[in-house]
Amino acid sequence: MKILVINSGSSSLKYQLIDMETENVLAKGLCERIGIANSNFVYKAHGQTIEQQIDMPTHEAAVKIVLDTLTDKRVGVIKSMDEIDGVGHRVVASGEAFKKPTLVTPEAMKLMEEIKDLAPLHNPAAIVGVNACLAQMPHTPMVLVFDTGFHFTMPDYAYMYAVDYSHYEKYKIRRYGAHGTSHKYVAEEAAKYLGKDLCDLKIITCHLGNGSSITAVKGGKCVDTSMGFTPLAGVPMGTRSGDIDFAAAEYIAEKEGMDVSEMLTYLNKKCGMLGISGVSSDFRDLSAAAEEGNDRARLALDMFAYATKKYIGSYAAVLNGVDVIVFTAGIGENDDKVRAASLKDMEYLGVKLDDYKNAHCPRGTVAEIQADDSRVKVLVIPTNEELVIARETVQEAKLA
Ligand code: AMP
C-alpha cells in the first residue's frame, strides 16, 4: 500500500510517497514558487535528485507535475496513479472543529472553509492543496491530519486562557498547540526504543526547530504543550517572540505606530532569535556569531535554553516526575550545545547528560545521551511527521 503525503504552503507544496508495508519513502520533493515566476520542482528518488525550473501557475499544476514524475517511465517509482491508495494532507489549525484526522468529504471541506482564519497563512493553502489533489485523483481517499490533533487530550484547566468565558464559547479561544504529529511520533518511538509500554511513561518531548514547542506526555497522551492559540506562544523561536506580556506588545505598538496586524507580523517575523541577536534566526549562524564574541547572539542562545529548561521543569511538575526527555527537529537533533544548556543543573530531577555522548550523538538515528547514573533517559530522536500523517491516513480511510 502506498500513501502520498502532501504539505501545502501558500506558494509551495512538499510531498512524499511512502510504501506502508516497509514505511520506506519511495520518492519525495518540493514544488516552490507556485504561482510566481521561476517555479522550481525538486524530486528525490532512487538515491538521485532532480531539480528543474518548471512553470507551475497553480497548485493543481504542481500536483500534476508531481504525479507525472512519480509515474514517469524513466525516473518514476510507480506505474500508474492507481497505485496511490490514499493521500494524507497536513493541516496546521483545526480549531475545535476537528479533533482527530478526518476523511475529506464535501462536509469536511465546508468546515475547513469556516475555520480558515484560524491560520490565515496556512489553512487556505491546505484547502487549495486538497482541491488540487481531488482534481487529479477524484476517487482516491484523502485524509486531513491536523498539527493540533495530538493535543486534544489536554485537560480544560491546561488549555483554557483566563479570559471572559463567553469568548471561549463564542470564538473557541484556547490553547491548541502545534507540531502534534511530531510529538506523537517521538513519544511512541521513545517507548519502542526503550522497550517500554507507552502507557507507563512520563515523557517530555522537545521539538526544537525554527518553530519550537515542548509537550508533556503522560501514558501516550498530551497533557500540556507550550504553543497556544497559534504557534506564536511558548519558547522564543527563530523569528517568533514566544511568551510575552501582551501589555509590552501594546506599548511597543503604541510607540512605533503599529496596528494589531502589524504587531502580529512583528511578533511572528521580527522577534525571537533574530530580534534579540540582530544576526540571524538560524542556530548555526547564532552559534558561529556567539563563538566570535557577539554578545547578543550569546544572549539569544541563553534565552532559548533558559526558556526550554523552564518548560521542562514545569512539565516535570505537571507530570509528577519524568522518565524520558526527548529532543527532536533541526535544533533538537543537531545542536548539542542547546541540549546541554537546556538540561544544565537538573540533577535534582534525576537528569544528567553524558557530555561525550551528547557531543558525539550520531545523526539520523535514535540515540541515548544521558549519563549512566541519570535516572531520566534523554533521547535524541529524528522526527518523521510525514510517516505519522501516512499512518493516520491508512487508519482513518480504513485502508489497512
Ligand atoms: P527545522 O525547523 O526543524 O528544520 O530546524 C531548523 C533549525 O535547526 C535552524 O535554526 C537550524 O539552524 C537548526 N539546525 C539544523 N541543522 C543544525 C546543525 N547541524 N547544528 C545546529 N543547528 C542546526
Image: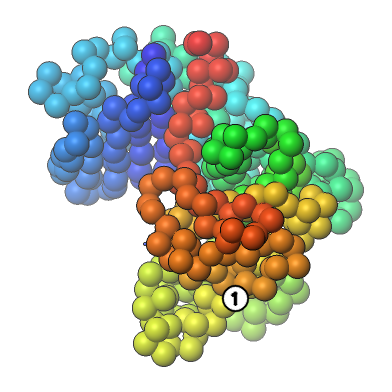
- How is this picture coloured? rainbow
Tell me residue 283's x, y (percent).
43, 69
Q: Quadrant of residue 198?
A: top right
Task: Residue at 65%, 59% (x, y): give it.
Answer: 374
Assess disc 1: are there few (<14), some (14-19) or many (≥20) residues with their C-alpha within 10 Å of its C-alpha: some
127 over 352 or under it: above or below = above
Query: In the shown orientation, is residue 229 left or right of residue 170?
Result: left
Task: Residue at 22%, 32% (x, y): give it.
Answer: 45
Task: Residue at 50%, 82% (x, y): give it.
Answer: 298
Query: In the shown orientation, is residue 2 left or right of residue 396?
Result: left
What residue sits right under mark 1 in the picture?
303
Task: Residue at 53%, 14% (x, y): give it.
Answer: 397
Residue 276 visible, this orientation: no
141 over 76 or under it: above or below = above
230 over 385 or under it: above or below = below
Q: Quadrant of residue 271?
A: bottom right
Residue 8 visible, this orientation: yes
Q: Amino acid at mark 1?
A: Met
109 over 114 or under it: above or below = above
Tell me residue 174's x, y (percent).
76, 48
